Amino acid sequence: MEEAVLTSPEYWENSGIDIRLNPKRGYSTEGLADAVREQEIDSAVVLATSGSQGDAKFAVLEKRALLASAEMVNAHCAVSESDTWLAGLSTFHVGGLGIYARAFLSGSKVASFAWDSWQRDGQVFVEACEKSGATLTSLTPVHLFDLVEHDVKAPASLRGVYLGGGVIGPKLFYRGRELGWPLWPTYGMTEACSQIATSVEGDAEWLPVLEGWETKTVNGQ
């Protein structure tokens, strides 16, 4: 099972170039691992990112950087060995892979969920949360829209739902909170190995920057 591999010391502590690209996109990986090693990098993950616009680019993320990001997220969100993740985001996406890095460092458990089983009424997802006893999971605004549209209430076990991957409309967000979903809005980038800012207080308009990041305003923005 991939879950066991991605939470193991062998994966995170040993050398190796792990190329994780969406198989549906038809990327050519010929010579990619050798190109990474030529930069004197021997332990990394390669992901594709399009940024906010334009063609996809390859991001080379050293595993030690992914773990550093995971450590900051764990500290910010008080992730511990008592937590159980319901992991559905693809592991060729930094948000999906990041779950396993956080679980590895914290000793928390991971239960998998296949997003292709998602149904518009959200019941399959809720049942998976309840069956696994999930305390943490991740959703996109699209998934939240489905849950809100069908007035689906959050499972009692959840204490945090990382919400990211798109624009979060305030009306949608606060309706989700009214239904009991403990939403934690996030902002991140593939190149940053996951989250840069996250609000565990449930504020969709102001996201505290995680410790370890240096930020600055440019032209007052």
Image (cartoon, rainbow, N blue to C red):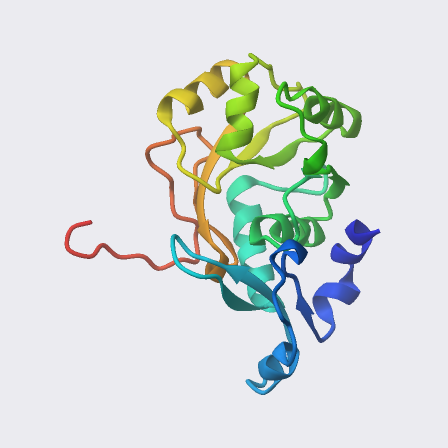
Count all numbered tags in the image, as a single digit: 0
Question: Where residue 175 appears, x then y in whole percent?
Answer: 45, 17
Question: Where residue 220 appears, x then y in whole percent?
Answer: 15, 51
Q: Residue, x 33% and y 36% (percent of image)?
A: 206
Q: Is residue 85 visible?
A: no
Q: Residue, x 63% and y 18% (percent of image)?
A: 121
Judged from this view, the residue extending furthest toward the top is 151
| In the foreground, 75 or 19 | 19
Q: Quadrant of residue 146?
A: top right
| In the foreground, 211 or 180 | 180
Q: Quadrant of residue 130?
A: top right
Question: Where residue 163 appears, x then y in whole percent?
Answer: 50, 36
Relative to residue 138, is residue 107 drawn left or right?
right
In the rendered image of this protein, does residue 34 appear above or below residue 109? Answer: below
Relative to residue 174, is residue 30 drawn left or right?
right
Judged from this view, the residue extending furthest toward the right is 1
Question: Where residue 109 appears, x then y in whole percent?
Answer: 75, 42
Q: Is residue 148 visible?
A: yes
Judged from this view, the residue extending furthest toward the left is 219
In the rendered image of this protein, does residue 16 appear above or below residue 179? Answer: below
